[in-house]
Image (cartoon, grey):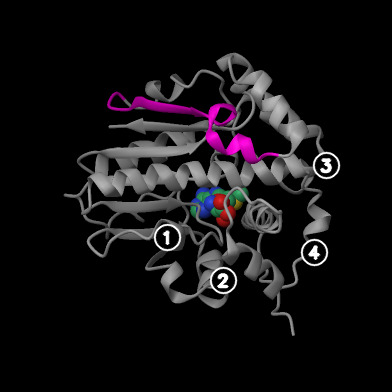
Amino acid sequence: MALTVPAFTPLQASLWLTLCGRALDNRLPRPILGDTMADEIVRKVDYDYKKLHIPSGSVINIAHRAKKLDEVAQRFIARHPDAVGLDLGAGLDSRVLRITPPPTADWYDIDFPEVIAARRELLPAAATPHGIAADLTGSTWLDPLPTDRPVVAVADGLIAFLSEEEMISLVGRVIDHFPSGVIAFNGYSTFAVRMQKIAPVGKAIREVSKFPGFNDPRTPERWHPKLKLAEEILCTREPEVDRFPLGLRLMNRLAAPSAVLSRPGNTVLVYRF
Ligand SMILES: C[S@@+](CC[C@H](N)C(=O)[O-])C[C@H]1O[C@@H](n2cnc3c(N)ncnc32)[C@H](O)[C@@H]1O
């Protein structure tokens, strides 16, 4: 028998979009991410993913950017085995199970209390080694975290739901808390903001989206004097495109030579401080 779908606010419920995207990727003949845990949860609660109208291109983009963010975290932790990892707005993502950090690193998943409670109910304990039940726009959730270790903070799908001021102050609090590190998140272009307003897949999150979007990857450098762009990952140029279905593969191949054409699509931005 299916478990009851947890009751979430519309903002919290945005997690279904990314979770179902990864679950549907896992059901493809050649998955990009292969997130079996996402698939298991969606089946366990018998979530009606069809109502989200996720087109196949978005399924692939969601899985692809998750893979790129996993790689950013893995690379950072390989260089800094004592790192602190943060998944900002973790939803029901079991990223730590995919990246398997060594025991010397500590991984924290941060999201609203209802979401952290749902993680404990639906995911194995190992998926949330440290859960922080908090509103990320608050100022105290970082207090219990170490201040003397490098940090890798990833935010997959969070940025749309914060205002620019909230994003700037969140980034500032992370930078002021840790001695050094990287902050990585999916790019959110003004084109993506416009598409979300008209595409059926945007319907579920339209009312709770706040971020205005930006196109220049250097824009966040203005958010904090220490923040510097380390890498702009244009997904059109990544090797996984070889596994995309034909139409999407061709579109990516055509856009790949041009950063201007690639940026409105799927990107992952990595900043260091
Ligand atoms: C689109 S979901 C992405 C979830 C997850 N990162 C994933 O990839 O499946 C956005 C998540 O951000 C969380 N979120 C949004 N605003 C937040 C805030 N102010 N504080 C804590 N979590 C927040 C939501 O609860 C939701 O789980």
Residue bearing the label numbered 1: 96
* Residue at x 47% of width, y 54% of height: 135
Q: Nearer the viewer, residue 32 or 21?
A: 32
Residue bearing the label numbered 3: 200
Q: Position of residue 234 (x, y in %)?
A: 53, 27
Q: Quadrant of the N terminus?
A: bottom right
Residue extent of the magenta highlight:
225-244
Q: Label 4, label 3: how many angstroms apart (C-alpha)?
A: 15 Å
Secondary structure under tag 1 reads helix
Secondary structure under tag 3 reads helix
Q: Amino acid at mark 2?
A: Ala
- Mark 1 surroundings: few (<14), some (14-19) or many (≥20) residues within 10 A: many
The numbered mark, 1 or 3, whose residue comes first in the sequence reads: 1
Q: Amino acid at mark 4?
A: Asp
Q: Position of residue 83 (x, y in %)?
A: 25, 51
Q: Label 1, label 4: how many angstroms apart (C-alpha)?
A: 26 Å
* Residue at x 45% of width, y 68% of height: 127
Left or right? Give the position of 15 relative to 90: right
Q: Position of residue 87 (x, y in %)?
A: 43, 52
Left or right? Give the position of 182 relative to 95: left
Q: Nearer the viewer, residue 268 or 169?
A: 268
Secondary structure under tag 2 reads helix
The numbered mark, 3 or 2, whose residue comes first in the sequence reads: 2
| Location of residue 268 with respect to 216 vertically, above or below | below
Q: Amino acid at mark 1?
A: Val
Q: Label 2, label 1: how many angstroms apart (C-alpha)?
A: 16 Å
* Image mark for residue 118: 2
- Mark 2 surroundings: few (<14), some (14-19) or many (≥20) residues within 10 A: some
Q: Amino acid at mark 3?
A: Pro
Q: Are marks 4 and 3 in contact (CB under 8 Å)?
A: no
